Amino acid sequence: MSSVDEASRLVIEGLSRSFGETRALNSATLRVCPSEIHSLVGENGSGKSTLIKILSGVLRPDSGTLIWEGEVKQLTSPRSAQGMGVATVFQETLIVPEMTVRDNIYLGTDRLFRYGHRKGEEIAGARQALTDLGLDGLDLDQPMWTLSLAERQLTTVARAIIRPWRLLVLDEATSALDAQQRDRLFDYLRLARSQGKSILFTSHRMDEVLGLADRITVLRQGATVATMGASEASRRGILGHMSGREAHADADVVAETTPRHNGEQQHSSQPRPVLRVEELTLRAAAKPISVDVRAGEILGLAGLEGQGQVGFVECLCGLRRPVDGRVLALGDGGQSHTVRSYRGANRLGIRYVPRDRRYEGLFGPLSVFDNFAITLWSDLSRFGLLKRRQARKSFAAFAASSRLVSASPRRPISILSGGNQQKVLLGRWIAMRPRVLVVNDPLRGVDHNTKEELYGLFRRLADDGVAIIFLSTEIAELLTLTDQIAVFHEGSLVAVLPTEMSSDTDVVAAMFGDDKRHGGADD
Amino acid sequence: MTDSSPSAANVRSGSTLENVTAVVAANFTNALPYILVPVLFILSLIFIPGYFSKLSIISLLILASLLGLASLGQTMTIIAGGIDLSIPAVIGLSDIIVTQLYYKHWPLPVILLAIAGLAIVIGTISAVSSVLLHVHSLITSFGMSLVVSGVALEWSNGAVNGAVPGWLTNSVSAIGHTGPIPIPAIIIVWAVAAVLAVAFQRLTRVGRETYALGANPVAARLANVRSTWTLVVAFSISALCAAMVGVFFAGYSGIPDPTVGVPYFFLTITAVLIGGTSLLGGRGGYQRTVMGALIVAELTTLLVGVGFNASFQELALGILVIALTSTYGRELKVAAKI
């Protein structure tokens, strides 16, 4: 590859970055040439976004070198990256809804006391950029919030390309676009390539990666595992690199130490369904979802970021109204009730453990006991007075069964470790004897041992007949814990894989809309 | 596709020497209001000649009772994550109603029931409008305050005559008796109210929900906390307490005065903050506000006793608020570190 060195526009070597205990990037490498469209692929958490944030000056690496057109560079701010010639479109559509399209496009180019550009220049530049992207008809003076999501996304691309750039970085910049808009954008990118520019992009669609890229770099667990020419790459090959089928290490070790839930036993008795999803439509034009969840079943939910799995979970517990269809809670005697609100779902025994512990779950200043007992008081109070003794008993039983590590239930919950905080948040609902427990990525930031304990806790709950719906961003975790894995892609359920017969490659393939049972790509 | 972001999960409990001293420091700042109450009293004994008498102690306690009662509901609203700015207006209106209606020979129980009913209506409107309009109760209670004080001013316009029952005057007089007990009734009312308030916060469902709502409203909703009901209760208690203070003020002077509650705009918040209840919500308790009210009363008495004027008192209170709340702030940070 040394011959490429001189020709490379960008060379990244040994790039590492950690967040606390988590190693987001572990000695990653990347080379991007002039006149090249380069795709960066990997699963959730493989380090793509971190690499892009470092490349655009948002984050600083812990170590590693970045060589730009033959010179070693230190990026200290987004401005320094822009000055170098890197323009980035981030995954989150960063706009100011109240400002006009033109002001949004020129956001950040102003000097301290005067505008960086003349008004006429600005209008012409913005018009040109939007035309390049197929948005010729857009009124530059309309406020940003009046635009559709696709138009907003293209406007953020326009913001990037009005700057003098030699490397354009697109992080999931096509997620909201329809086929025509996407083709128009790709035409522009190919034109830019022919002018000697470089493009680095990530996408959750394998057909885009294979159709657009010249070369593909695969990241796994923060490290570069392969770089290949698009012509010599196959879907299966890329998916194999992403999931590390050959290496497999982590998933197998976990599976060995904690034997999977016994699926045979479950199916032989065929327990009754407790939750039925009927023709649920998450977004316009997405395929409706129908699925049953049985008592004692652990159903995993998987999908790349933003594919509808979170919306699905929110519909299940009444936090969000689906576009169409309904969620039914099925009683023991065959009666069914539609879930209409969060409170209604709770009354039906559907309990929800949110994703963000700190903002949606914990009462930071309150004690461990208070955090646990807050949901119990609706049952354990009489004329508004608390039955504290019963709540304490309930807490003691829970603390023992979950092996809660806490100096005293009267200490503030904020001093507990993440895993123990999560136990308390789970215990809050377990003590209410849920019929259905919906958990949204509960083991993020939880250390290994506590994770094992929580797996055990979930399994015991399932054995007691609780239906568990378990959304996770870690495939290994889903393979360890669940009975079936429901995979989401573009707002629809694309596959329900029986866990014991699936490998992580199967799951990853389905996540990229490449489910073998449905015969290839989605569109 | 995002990378897993750093979470606040790597906070671990440990027991190094550093942490032990941090815990001691945190406990000390926690205990600070309880230490200041006797310290300020002793300072008063030293600097004010002849201070140690029953009369001066009772005068001090009357002052603290008025403030303590007015701050009772404020403590609840602040713990719930809100704040009640209508307390002075409600005090003023209640003062007008008592003096005017009693002057017109209405029966006292009817007057008191009417005031209580009105207070609950006022508190409920502040709370419910805050929930429905998605604005902070700072705004809705301030609006309520303007309405209420407008009514009070209009009603009292030109009225200079008023009357109050003798026992009411007696209940706030330093030489007053409560039955056979040689202590004015307001102090006993405060003591009973304080016990009930602390019990309410610790032993009732809505009391615990007040803390949860103030600590994290999003999590409170997801944990099925009755947010609206909790706010209605907190603001109704606040208005009821303010109304009660208005009745006592009427006993104090006997003449209608719609502006009698004005100093309580800041004083109630001062007492709550000095006691150690946080404006962030979810932290503190009425037992702390009792200390806060005592500290404010003692400090005022001490400064008057040694000859400082009113403006200097405000200055001293301001410094105390900033000094104390900054140590409480530190305590939180330390707690988060362990």
Image (spheres, rainbow, N blue to C red):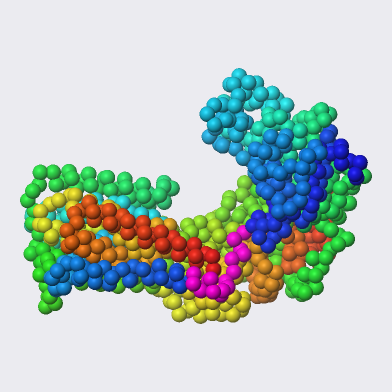
Estimate the x, y position of residue B282 in percent, counting from the top left.
Answer: 43, 62
B17 part of magenta stretch: yes
Viewer-nearest residue: A332 or B287: B287
Q: From the viewer's perspective, is B122 left or right of A51?
A: left
Q: Quadrant of residue A129?
A: top right
Q: Is residue B215 left or right of residue A7?
A: left
Relative to B104, does residue A159 appear above or below in the rendering? above
Q: Residue at x 10, y 43 (%)?
A: B158
Whether residue A474 appears in magenta in the rendering, the answer is no
Q: Is residue A186 left or right of residue B120?
A: right
* Direction top: furthest residue: A120
Residue B338 in the image, given as x and y percentages of width and height: 54, 68
Instruction: Decide which of A159, B37 is in the foreground and name it.
Output: B37
**Magenta segment, principal secondary structure?**
loop
The x and y percentages for residue A167 are 76, 36
Identify the residue shown where x is 34% and y is 64%: B275
Q: Is residue A117 above or below residue A390?
A: above
**Rendering quarter of residue A79:** top right
Q: Quadrant of residue B8?
A: bottom right
Magenta-drawn segment? B7-22
At x 30%, y 64%, the residue is B292
Is A438 in front, or is A78?
A78
| Quadrant holding the N terminus of chain A | top right
- For the point 79% across and 30% down, the residue is A192
User: What percent of the width, then of the height, locates residue A381?
Assistant: 42, 73
Q: Image check: A240 left or right of B157?
A: right
Does residue B175 show up?
A: yes
Whether residue A463 is situated above or below residue A499 in the rendered picture: below
Q: Nearer the viewer, residue A444 or A512?
A: A444
Q: Quadrant of the C terminus of chain A?
A: top right
